Amino acid sequence: MEKFFYPRSMVVIGASVKRLNLGHIIVLNNRQHNYEGNIYGVGREEGDIAGAPVYDSVEKIPEVPDVAIIIAPAETVPDFMDACGKKGIKRLVIESGGFSEYSQGQNVLEKKVLEIADRYGMRFIGPNCIGTINFDIKMMMPFGFFPRTAPGGRVAMIVQSGGVGGSYLGEFGDNAIIPGKFAAIGNKLQIDEVDVLEYLLNDDKTDVVTMYLEGFKRGRAFFDLAVQSDKPLIVLKSNRSDLTAKIAQSHTTALSADDQVVDGAFRQTAVIRVDDDIDFINAVKIIRLPLMKSRRVAILSRSGGHAVMSVDACAKFGFSLVDFPPAFIENLKTIYNTRVIAHQNPLDLGEIFDYTIFTQILEEALKLPDVDGVLFNHLYIADYEGKMSRDFLSNVGKLVQQYQKPVAMTMVTDTQELVNISKNQSYPIFTTPLTAAKALNMSATYYEEKTAREARGRAVQTTLDMAAIDIIQDKCKTQKRIPLTDESLRIVEAAGIKSIAGATVKSAKEAGDVSLHFPVAVKLLSRDASHKSDIGGVRLNIKNQRELKKAISDIKKSLKEMKPRPAMDGFLIQEMSADGVECFVGGRQDPVFGPIVIAGLGGIFLEIFRDTSIRLAPVTKSEALDMLKNLQAYPILQGARGKMKADIDAFADVICRVSNLLAAVPDIAEIDLNPVIVHEQGKGVSIVDSRIFFK
């Protein structure tokens, strides 16, 4: 990847000397920005562009460029790649559009591109992209005009969409954020976000990586990088709904993972997920400040109304307001002597007009050990207080570095002043108490998730009885069927998860020999029906042998009348479970992220509210507990309103073991333990039913 960001020389294929086409613009950009390397063009006619020589063939270039940028009609790309290969050029950026993002019929063309790259050992970005930028060496691959940017930026950006990336670079400039490196990767036919991310995480000139993605090509590889990253990753992942999936497919042809899976993976890796452009920029602003290491906040405000709004905003994100200690209050009285202001949190500074006092009060607040961050609302009239406010911002920046605590500054003034101060002041500002509180929440959440990630380490693989699993799997494959319920439960037991007591019989007569405690349930075993209750294959609360035999006979009779008639492979008799909270645990092999585990409460919480929590498997015990805490219905497990407190620890253990089973046996396409009855604290869980599908 190094040559994509530090090329000593480049050639732009498709550059016209006579007209301002896209290739011409790329050459012109680099000349005007004073790119430090050599740049050449290849076009139909020879000449020069702003002094850069243009040749009519790749062969005529006087050196072997580090990178070739191809921006020519899609059908000509393979021939130009071949010419580059013969020249010895090993790095390409294919900016041309008209591939699979345009028509699935272009897959043949993409296959040809990959074949040529493989033949010559080439690495390429694209197609349908605008390439990379390195602001430090003034290297610009995009075909749009970009303003000059100061060197030394330590924020990098990876995007799938060049249009989105260009607009975000503009937003960076409007908010005094200096970018360092940029990559727009388009269709990701070969090089993808994982390749670029790995490079940037190892780049000593990058502190923060931002990303705009519509889908993941290698989700598990992304996860493995992110989970070890010491650098903040800020990601705006679009394509979250069914409505956008088709649009994103036509735009990038990228695989799209289930958004809940993405959300779970981001929580595990401490990726800062943002929902829109505003949050994207605000996350970059706040993450460059010291992190908020707990959720205790002080609010200082020049407006009582904004103070009230700030309290609401902080409450929304789970912050607590610090009670100012008596010593702090006494100290304030020595700084200013107004009697109007109430000495409480939030602290209303509306009667103060001395800017040195603002700085003193802020410093006293930052000194307090119970204060983890400050939200400061600063209202001012630009014509009278503009310079003082800008000087105050500089002082805020110094105090933040001194005390290593974030201060979210809400600046309330006229529009033009906001534009000017955002663009020209290095200290980040926000425009409302809500956006400021939301930014502090991003900082606090990142610290919490990163700390938890580092503390929990990696999941420990539990012992599995692979021999037992293999026997069942081989039998199912030979007979070309899904595992029966009793077989699924035996697979679960092979993972160390004990199911409820039961026995398998072939007939009502055999049921008479079963030694179980009544009441019991009886379930049909059928290779043709994974949902037994849907076809009347389940009977509950059977109190004695007579009822048991009748239940089996009734199920048989009802099935004989069905067309087509499902197979009857036997019956599973189980003891009825003791009372508890009905829950479920499941998982599957995600095509992008690999094995995932899912958990939640059952019944209406699953069927109506879809209240579930997902993580990539395997998970640690602390991750499993975190999954449960993320559920909206978690208070039910805790024993809300005097109800039974459930055995949360035992439930978390089941989640861990299911996750280990999925990770260890990739042939399991899907598993569903439903219901899992979680009993009173200390009394464990009962696995009532299980479905497993092999690939």
Image: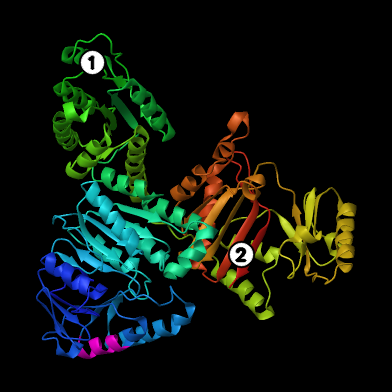
Q: Main secondary structure of the magenta part?
A: helix
Quarter of image, res 74: bottom left
Furthest residue to the top? 339
| Residue at the spot of label 2 | 491
Quote the CA–CA distance across marks 2 and 1: 64 Å
- Using the image, determine if residue 297 lies above or below residue 42: above
- Using the image, determine if residue 539 lies above or below residue 349: below
* Residue 567, image x, y percentages: 79, 71
Highlighted magenta segment, given as a residue range: 79-88
The residue carrying pointer 2 sits among few (fewer than 14), some (14 to 19) or many (20 or more) residues within 10 Å by Cα, namely many
Q: Of 191 and 261, which appears nearest the observer?
A: 191
- Chain-order first, disc 2 or disc 1: 1
Q: Quadrant of the N terminus?
A: bottom left
Q: Is residue 80 magenta?
A: yes
Query: Could you tell me which residue is drawn at 29 percent across and 63 percent down?
Result: 197
Query: Could you tell me which residue is drawn at 56 percent across and 51 percent down?
Result: 599
| Residue at the spot of label 1 | 327
The amino acid type found where label 2 is placed reads Ile
Mark seen at residue 385? none
Label 1: state its secondary structure.
helix
Q: Is residue 67 visible?
A: yes
* Residue 371, image x, y percentages: 28, 29
The amino acid type found where label 1 is placed reads Ala
Quarter of image, res 348: top left
